[in-house]
Image (cartoon, grey):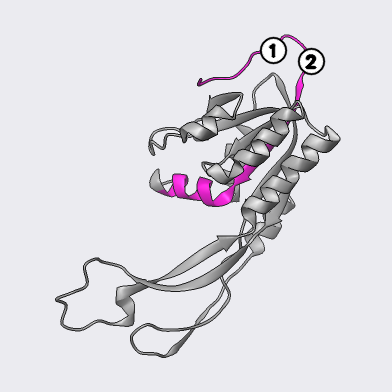
Amino acid sequence: MVGGFLRSGPVMKTAILIDGGHLRACAKAARITYDNDFIEGFARSCVDESEYLFRIFYYDSPQFRGKATLPVSGEQTTFKSNDSWLRDLAMREKFAVRRGTLGFRGWKPKKIPIQGREELSDQDFTPVFEQKGVDMRVGLDIATFSDKGTVDRIILVSADTDMIPAMKHARKAGLEVALTQLPIPPARDLHFDLQAHADFVRLVAWP
């Protein structure tokens, strides 16, 4: 169901876990500038008056840094990145940043189909990157919360069904697990299997 539990008992000690790739994609679709002020504002809007914010855990990968061969000319190009924004985010109050890695996986055409075009250039292709390690880090943190009883409730900002085993582990340990439904736009319904292993779904407005 959409909503939250209003509790008359003790305040719920709550951790927010944010999949940065998911939040970034949703913000981009809503044409929202994605920066640290937005991330912090969004994270703090995820909790309500029944909850004590224990910590905000943010999971993301710095941009790829390295060399690659261009798909048409065969020349070398260098990808440069700046991860200062992740360092700055980690310095904010109540934030903990967990870093994954980003790997280069080749090139894909910007427009499909590409047949019939007389001449292609490197500018007709865009790089493909793959994020690794984020799901594992989310799962490890949820397992730690579950085994040590660090928090009472987890609010998960993700639409990845790979989170389900960790969600099940947390609920078996007695933690409440909430999912966040982001507003329209974009209209991204959470997968049924995710909702089936959550205690409730909370609609969170853009800050």
Residue 110: say if magenta: no
Residue denoted by label 1: 7
- Residue type indicated by callout 2: Pro
Camera-nearest residue between 152 and 56: 152
Looking at the rendered structure, the secondary structure element under dot 1 is: loop
In the rendered image, residue 6 lying in the magenta stretch gets the answer yes
Place of residue 180 in the rendered image (x, y in percent of width and height, measured from the top left): 55, 32
Q: Is residue 134 left or right of residue 69?
A: right
Disc 1 crowd, CA 10 A, few/some/many (<14, 14-19, 20+)? few
Label 2 sits on a secondary structure element that is loop
Q: Which range of residues does the magenta coloring cover?
A: 1-28
Q: Residue drawn 57% across and 38% down?
A: 42
Q: Is residue 153 visible?
A: no
Q: Quadrant of residue 103?
A: bottom right
Name the disc covering residue 178, or none: none
Labels 1 and 2 touching (C-beta < 8 A) = yes
Whether residue 152 is situated above or below residue 207 in the rendered picture: above
For this orientation, the residue located farthest to the top is 8
Q: Which residue position holds label 2? A: 10
Q: How many residues crowd mark 2 within 10 Å: few (<14), some (14–19), many (20+)? A: few
